[in-house]
Amino acid sequence: MKRANKLVGSWMRAAGMEVRVDAAFNLIGRLSSKKRGAKCLVIGSHLDTVCNAGKYDGPLGVLLGLAVAERLRGRSLPFHLEVVGFSDEEGVRYHTTYLGSRAMLGLLGKRDLDLIREKGIEKARRSHRDLLAYLEAHIEQGPVLQRLRRPLGVVTAIAGQSRIRAAFIGRAGHAGTTPMTMRKDALCAAAEVILVAEKLGVVATVGQCAVDPGVSNVIPGKTTFSLDVRDAKDAKRKAACAKLHRLAAAVARRRGLRLEWKVVQETATASMDRNLTTALRRAAGQAPLLPSGAGHDAAEMALACPSAMLFVRCKDGISHHPDESVRTADVASALDVLTRAVLELAERHG
Ligand code: GLV
Ligand code: MN
Ligand code: MN
């Protein structure tokens, strides 16, 4: 994160921006307006990535913001233009997502602060009153735009997420001598829950699963696993999580195991701002509207100011994978659209 901030910060400085890194490691480049009492238009995305990621999930939106700033440098705008590279959007480190944007908006709760080892992260907080609007460009991470043969789309809403860390604690034992009816196999218990999650009618993923002691001839004594549940309808997502929790408790009872179940994050579905979305769509030649199943910092920024998102077509919808790919021409279109949208905002606020 520090190396990425240093590199992108040097590009921001070269574009004439004042650059700082806040207490949550968010990188902030700014072109200040001369207008008195000017608010701040933020264009951003995240610079962190998942492990073994592609090149575009996150960094593309930051670099597009930077390219907009390069184009508009020297123009007098009625707002400050900030480009933000948020830190830890993915939740790789603590399994809780949007850390950078939530810290910046003062939205970290006790649950987050108990998890986070970096002390003083709360100092990243800034006033919501300074914020005029937020724009984020991002690869679609899905196949819809490619199927529609359209380079760009505009986001209606970002699906809510629940992230849970769970563990079954059973009893390790000899794989050859312990009868099948006398085991407390923690991995078999987790498997029951994982297979039900797959068929529950929501988007659910178990992306981490650690078996302890993790030895081929030892019965799993403990299995720790993650659960990521999403749906555009918050009630449906919450009901699915409650159902899985009840199931896990019943499995633990039946198998004589102990269950640990900790909700590490719950983010509601976030609607994008209607006016800003309309403006972005106009700038994008009535680009198609689509919802986002992936999480984005815009979901948090929408709690503080009008926010909208532009999606860029990506090859075969592949993301969170090294094969992520975009067309240069599509990125050029996104840059034109973002620039037009910023200039339209400038006219409206000038
Ligand atoms: C972020 O990329 C997420 O949706 O998990
Ligand atoms: Mn991602
Ligand atoms: Mn992303």
Image (cartoon, helix red, strand yellow):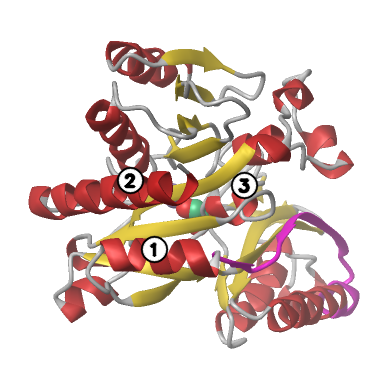
* Mark 3–mark 1 CB contact (< 8 Å): no
Q: Is residue 49 above or below residue 186?
A: above
Q: Residue at x 81, y 73 (%)?
A: 245
> Residue 207 appears at what percent x and percent y?
53, 57
- Where residue 26 sits, quadrant-wise, is top right
Range covered by the magenta-colored residues: 250-272
* Residue count near mark 3 (Cα–Cα under 10 Å), binned few <14, some 14–19, many ≥20: many
Q: Residue at x 23, y 31 (%)?
A: 71
CA separation, marks 3 and 1? Answer: 28 Å
The amino acid sitting under disc 3 is Thr
> Residue 12 appears at what percent x and percent y?
34, 18
For mark 1, what is the residue? 279
Tell me if 15 is positioned left or right of 255 in this view: left
For mark 2, what is the residue? 343
Report whether residue 175 is seen: no
> Residue 284 appears at what percent x and percent y?
25, 64
For mark 3, what is the residue? 97
**Which of disc 2 and disc 3 is earlier in sequence?**
3
Report whether residue 85 is seen: yes
The amino acid sitting under disc 2 is Leu
Q: Is residue 338 above or below residue 11?
A: below
CA separation, marks 1 and 2? Answer: 11 Å
**Which of disc 2 and disc 1 is earlier in sequence?**
1
Q: Is residue 332 above or below residue 163?
A: above
Of the pair 246 and 271, the residue shown nearer to us? 271
Q: Residue at x 41, y 69 (%)?
A: 278
